[in-house]
Image (cartoon, rainbow, N blue to C red):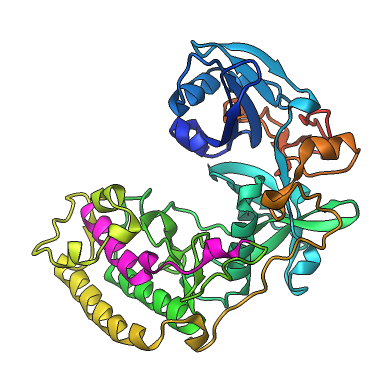
Amino acid sequence: MGSQWFSNCRLDFRFDVDRRAPFATGGSRWLTFDWDTRRVIDVCVPEEIEEDEEFVFGALDKFINDLPLDVVRVEISEKGKLLSSSSELYHDFYYIPYYPRRTDFPRRLKTIPRSDLTEVDRLGVQVDLTTYTPANGQTKKVVFKYYFTPNNVSGFWHEINCVMRMPKHPNIVPFDSLVVEKIDGLDRVVGFTTIYIPGGTLEENKSRVFKLKYLEQLTGVVDHLNLHLGIVHGDICPWNLLIDETTDTIQLFDFNSSSKLGWDGNVGNQDLDGEFAYDKDRNDVKFVIFTVYEIITREFNFRQTFEPHELDESMEMNMEVWDKDPDVLLDRPVEDYRRVLEKWAKERAVIDKRIDHYSEASEPLSWPVLRTVADPKLITLGEHFRVLGASRAGFAEAGKEFIRWERPATKALPLPAGQRLLATGEIVDEGGDSRSNRPGRR
């Protein structure tokens, strides 16, 4: 196994609260995601405790790695100690996210069964480094991006459609495959893979020279996205940029904040597309300027202090001097980087007055809205959940299949020699025999 991101991350990165509700006997219930073990637990907190995520996360951290994976509810004391746990169906209050059908995507795209992927490392929330062996017999490393919560359904649909439809570009991490799982005879798309580029992001790997040509490549790929494809990345930053050492090129990835330039998002339609409308405050030109400033100075105070709508590129461009961090390596003076940025920003200010909608781009990307209402496999639970998902307990009680994601905690890794962990969460022998760690409920 590799670095295992969850070994060192903050507790509020590992855990997240979906919603809170009153507890029948007093106190409150906190429905909590554990991104490491990929499960949801209802945490019952005594009424003596005020609404405090830090307390809930700290309590969970003490015992969650040792809980059986089928536990869906825990009750904790005012001191954060585990009082009880339950694996009963009637205590399972979460929902299965909707997964689109394989037939909702272009036929030309390659697919991989989730069970063919072997986990190698955990790179972040719902992002893993995996391997698989294609027909040529040569093991391939890919980044597997997926979702197991209803909150990610619409975002996943927009991101995967954007990435898979994008023409190959020398400065964009390439799409690899759709990841599928068969449920009730239908292939469902549960995630996708992209090509893995080693070496770490520009935030993580600080030992490399940041060359002026990387900046020129970055402005070029942003022009390609915005003006040629009508796509705004929306989150350009050092942690979304890599260097491919084999081609000596900068690589942009992570399109989960992307949108179509000037797009309204079909506000009010049944598929919640309004959440992914274009946000002018996440302008790529502005974010490139902040990114280059952060790479050169290693100062992140602007983005850490201000929201996107409060950020303005003049904060940095009007500075007389950018103080280069002494450990940063450049191949040209700082002034050369600033000249390139200033010239490009002025050119884009003129162009952007002419092209302010994706339909005006030279070859705009577009894709259909997500349609789930007519899907007979989706059980809706009222207006709020018409797109998001269906009752996990209801599926189990009815004997219906659904996709499971639970896996061992990072603490339990690496596995003993001769075993490997599949992307399904199952442990298998190298020979292929399963040593499933799955809960008994399905």
Horizontally, residue 152 falls left or right of residue 12, namely right
Horizontally, residue 190 falls left or right of residue 348, namely right
Residue 88 vertical position relative to residue 318 in the rendered view, above or below = above
Residue 105 vertical position relative to residue 59 in the rendered view, above or below = below
* Residue name at image x 81 percent, y 49 percent: 379
Magenta stretch: dominant secondary structure: helix
Horizontally, residue 382 falls left or right of residue 186, namely left
Horizontally, residue 86 falls left or right of residue 312, namely right
Residue 389 vertical position relative to residue 19 in the rendered view, above or below = below
Count of numbered circles on the image:
0
Can you see residue 30? Answer: no
Locate residue 417, reporting x and y percent: 68, 30
* Residue name at image x 35 percent, y 75 percent: 219
Front in this rendered view, residue 388 or 439: 388
* Residue name at image x 90 percent, y 38 percent: 398
Locate residue 299, reporting x and y percent: 23, 50
Quadrant that contains the C terminus: top right
Locate residue 405, reporting x and y percent: 71, 40
Can you see residue 347? Answer: yes
* Residue name at image x 76 percent, y 61 percent: 372
Locate residue 53, reporting x and y percent: 47, 28
Quadrant that contains the N terminus: top right
Magenta region, residue range? 272-299
Front in this rendered view, residue 65 or 174: 65
Does 296 lie within the magenta span?
yes
Does 352 lie within the magenta span?
no
